[in-house]
Every structure is written in C-alpha cells, then in structure tokens.
Image (cartoon, rainbow, N blue to C red):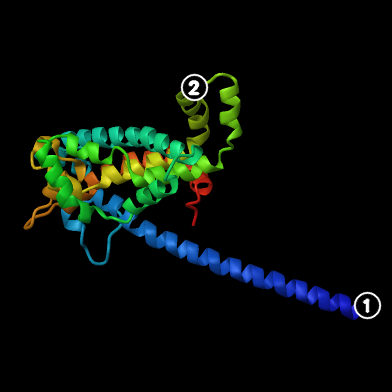
Amino acid sequence: MRKTCKRGDNVSNNRKTTRWLYSGISYGFIIIACVISLVPILWMISTAFKPLNEVFTIPLKWLPSEPQFENFVLPFQERPFGRYFLNSSLVSTVVTLSNLFFCSLAAYGIAKYDFPFKRAVFIGILSVMMLPIEVRAVPLFLLMRSFGWVDNYLPLIVPDMITAFGIFIMHQYFLSVPGEFMDAARIDGSGEFHTFWRIMLPLCKPALSALAIFTFMGVWNDYFWPLIVISRDAYRTLPLGLAMFENVYNTQYNQVMAISLLASLPVLLLFTVMQKRFIDGMVMSGLKG
C-alpha cells in the first residue's frame, strides 16, 4: 500500500512539474511576443518627442535629451492635418454606423428567416470576402467615375456602407440568439422591424462592438482606395496626408512619428472603451483563435 501511494504521489508530482513547465514555456513565448510587438510602438512614442538629430543615433537612444513638443505642432502648420483628421473621422464614423445597421439587418434576415436559395445567398456573400480590393479596384473606380463621384466623400463612404465581413460576424452571432425572443415579441404584437430594432439588436451588443472596432480601424487606416479616388487636398484622409508629408530628400521622421502617434489614439480609445464587449463578440461569433 505504501509503495502504491508513493508511486501515485510521484506520478502526480511529475504531472504537476510537466504542467508547470508547459505553462512556463507558454508564458515565456507570450512575454517575448508582447515585447516584440511593443518595441515599435515604444520607438514611435520615443521618436515623436526627439529632435531630428537623435532619431537614428547609434546606440539607440530611447529617451530624448529634451522633449520636443513642437513636433506635434509643426506638421499642422506645414500641411492641413486638421482637415485630414476631420475627413478620416467623418468617413470612418459614417461607414461604421452604416455597417452596424445594414450588416446587422442583412445578417438578421439570413439567420432568422427561411427563403428560397438562402444558403446560396450566404455562400455568395462569403465569396465576396475572398476578393481583395486590388481585384475590385479598377471596375469599382470606373463605376465611381461614371457616377461623377471621384474627388469627394461619396467614393470613400458608399462602397463600404455594407460589407460581407460585417454580415458574417453578425450572422454568426444571431445564430446564437434564441428564436424564442422573436416568438414572444410576435405574441405581444410586435412588428418584424420593431422586433429586430428593439429586441434582437440590443442582444447583439458584443458583436456590434467587435464590428465597430474592425470597421472603424479598417477605414481609418485605409490608404489604397483613397489614393485611387482622391486627388484633391480637401478630401484627403489621414493616411494620404501622412504619405504626402514624407519627403524623398528630407523627411522629418520625428514629426511623422508625432502625427502617427496622434493618428493611433482614436482607434486605441475605441478599443479601450469596447474591449470587454469586443472579446465577448469574438467568442460568441466564432472568430476566437
């Protein structure tokens, strides 16, 4: 009996040791990955406050000898970055709100109603996700030009007002919402749109938060499509303004990093506010890693 107990204790101790070893290795990789991810961000923050002659010093100097707060002011004097921020904010906000409404409405219809060729419609929507913007850019630009929409806000907003990715996220979440809510609302005399707007949509706040973050971040950082359809300075977004601020012969990298730091704050603020619901939305919609 004693030998059996000792063997059992040894096996248990070995399992605990192995478990602790695997946990230590896993946490070690996570810490290394976090450090690798944070180094460029820390360098951007550090460079934003440096004078230009300290940007590429060897060895690397993390703390500036004297913080240069004018790095955040001079770019606004040289280029209309205030206008660029306004354009990006307007386009990103309108596109995000449009996606939240139209994508959830389309996903609700596909997930909760039966109609002919329902599966084919959903597969067709998913197939759109496989086409990158580079494939759609030329015909989409020709379409925008035929409408006379080049060089204004419309080509930046209308093509992205509803997206296949947004429909997919909301569809997956609606599948997890019990249909009994709809049945109870109909018994109470609620109309179809009222059921969607007042009952079903408030239950999808985590998925809506996830979709809002993905959409806002994607539109805010988009460079390729605005570069094609916008040539007037009055309608340029922030990524285009940053690209034009860089000079081939003399780039003020400290000022570029300062503007990049300011440009990252809206997305960071949005993610901070919606972090908990964002994670819940990813889990419930089936997009967890």
Q: Residues within 10 Å of mark 2 (few under 14, many from 20)?
A: few
Task: Give SS at disc 1.
Answer: loop
Q: Can residue 243 be seen in this view?
A: yes
- Residue lying at the far top in this picture: please name it: 189
Task: Please provide percent x and percent y for residue 81.
Answer: 16, 38
Q: Do callouts 1 and 2 mark residues in contact (Cβ within 8 Å)?
A: no
Looking at the image, which is closer to me, 230 or 126?
126
Label disc, if present, on residue 1 of the rendered structure: 1
Task: Please provide percent x and percent y for residue 283.
Answer: 52, 48
Number of numbered discs present? 2
Tell me the CA gap for discs 1 and 2.
Answer: 72 Å
- Pointer 2 residue: 191
Give the residue drawn at x 10%, y 41%: 145
Q: In this view, does 53 lie above or below 166?
A: below
Q: Residues within 10 Å of mark 1 (few under 14, many from 20)?
A: few
Looking at the image, which is closer to me, 108 or 71?
108
Task: Please provide percent x and percent y for residue 71.
Answer: 19, 44
Q: Is residue 234 left or right of residue 108?
A: left
Q: Look at label 2 and name its amino acid.
A: Gly
The earlier-in-sequence mark between 1 and 2 is 1
Q: Look at label 1 and name its amino acid.
A: Met
- Residue lying at the far right in this picture: please name it: 1
